[in-house]
Image (cartoon, helix red, strand yellow):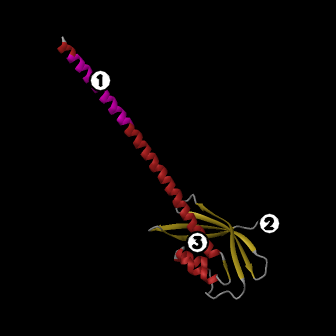
Amino acid sequence: MSKNTGLIGLSILLLLSVVSIIGLYSENSELKEEITALTIEQESEYQEVQDVSNLEDKAQFIQTAFNNILNYTTETYNERLSKTENYFTVESHELLSGVGNNLEPSIGIQSSTSNEQVYQSLQGDNRFIYVAEISYQVEDNEPVVIEYLYQFNLLERNNEYRIDSVEIIPKQPTIY
């Protein structure tokens, strides 16, 4: 009888062990699924943060590029053109440099920007629009303020950017 009781006790113990192992296996599988789901969620959040950071880097690059070429005085007129080679492709550089020679202007000029904004175009991830009010002043005359839109592609190679295919769109002044 004690042998049967011992066998019954061992059988119950074995049965409880098997049930416990199955329960732990099931719980372990659920935990693995939760960890996998959290890892995927963290990776997507990291990717979103990285995308936002990358977009901020691009916007800062664009802002700096246009500030260098659009903000100048008589003394810094030619200096700004040499800086643009770091920001624009050759074609865009030539377009934004305009026509004429490399001599300093013989009269006093000043160009400055305000209300600058950078937008990512809906036409593609590397298509942007830069908007700014540009104030041109010649000598002591009143400044002329025109809002310009610059549409362009932002090329990226080896973590370096260049602005290409610039289209300049002056906004017509509003008459009141």
Between disc 2 and disc 3, the foreground one is 3
Q: Is residue 46 above or below residue 6?
A: below
Read off the magenta span: 6-30
Label total for image: 3
Q: Is residue 57 above or below residue 90?
A: above
Tell me the amino acid under the disc marked 2: Ile
Residue positioned 35% across, 32% down in the render: 26
Q: Badges 1 and 3: C-beta atoms under 8 Å apart?
A: no
Give coordinates of residue 48: x percent, y percent. 50, 53
Label 1 and label 3: CA atoms lie apart by 72 Å
Give coordinates of residue 81: x percent, y percent. 59, 80
Q: Which mark is residue 60?
A: none
Residue positioned 72% across, 67% down in the render: 172
**Is residue 124 among the parts visible in the rendering?**
no
Mark closer to the chain start, 1 or 3 = 1
Q: Is residue 116 above or below residue 72?
A: above
What residue is disc 3 on? 65
Label 1 and label 2: CA atoms lie apart by 88 Å
The residue nearer to you, when weighing 2 against 86, is 2
Residue positioned 61% across, 83% down in the render: 78
Tell me the amino acid under the disc marked 1: Leu
Residue neighbourhood size for the residue with mark 3, other residues' Cα within 10 Å, grouped as few (<14), some (14–19), many (≥20): many
What residue is disc 2 on? 175
Q: Split into 4 quadrants, where in the image is the N terminus?
A: top left
